Image (cartoon, grey):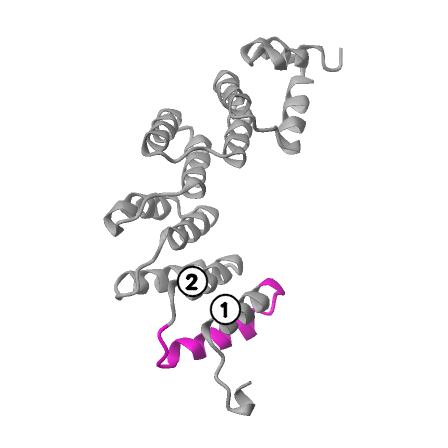
Amino acid sequence: MLRKGVTPGAVTYNTILQGLFQTGRFSEAKELYLNMIKSEKQWGIYTYNIILNGLCKNNCVDEAFIMFQCLCSKDLRPNIITFTIMIDALFKGGRKKDAMDLFAAIPAHGLVPNVVTYRLMMENLIQEGLLDEFENLFLAMEKSGCLPNSRMLNAIVRRLLRGGEIVRAGAYLSKIDEMNFSLEASTTSLLISLFSREEYKNLAKSLPEKYHFLEEVNK
């Protein structure tokens, strides 16, 4: 295109960027987006989200965080997807305080968390053993009108089960049933794996009645 004197539009650039990142051609993607940023063209937040996500997926979280902070100081406003990309990457990179601070800053930017943002926070709170904070956040999410989806509830159940929180896990298994969601294969597999152990068999009664069959696993 450029050789023919045709300047690609944002949609074309976005498609190329995504393709380069997704096929592991990171150096080419980086060269492209650096040239894009140096140009006088104004790029939308969708483009920056692609770049940030690509950086984070390639273990360049520090570079992505600096870019994110620059975006926050410009007229271009990050959206909730931008925040979610960074929160996810910061948690995975072990920067839990930065991730939690970023979540707390969302309202100041005139945004509200979505179900993915909430899920990331809740999984981390459970992992850290902050169960009261987790349940308070879940209630706050519901109060805000954001409903849990199947992926969130399955993830919560798995985290709670792995942490030995069988009664709490049972409460969220009930929510899965109430909302007519299905157990994901990984959730079912974890239930069977745990309750095949002798020390868990008596705890099956802490789960909703439909799961009491787990008492009989491997008998």
Q: Is 56 part of what is drawn in magenta? A: no
Q: Amino acid at mark 2?
A: Tyr
28 displayed left or right of 185: left
Q: Which numbered marker is on residue 14?
A: 1
Whether pointer 1 and pointer 2 mark residues with C-beta atoms closer than 8 Å, the reply is yes
Q: CA distance from mark 1 to mark 2?
A: 8 Å
Image point (38%, 81%), residue name: 39
Indicate the quadrant where residue 219 lies: top right
Label 2 environment density (alpha carbons within 10 Å; few <14, some 14–19, many ≥20): some
Q: Secondary structure at mark 2?
A: helix
164 displayed left or right of 63: right
Q: Is residue 69 above or below residue 218?
A: below
Image point (39%, 75%), residue name: 37
Q: Position of residue 9 (x, y in %)?
A: 47, 76
Image point (56%, 75%), residue name: 28
Which residues make up the magenta segment? 22-42
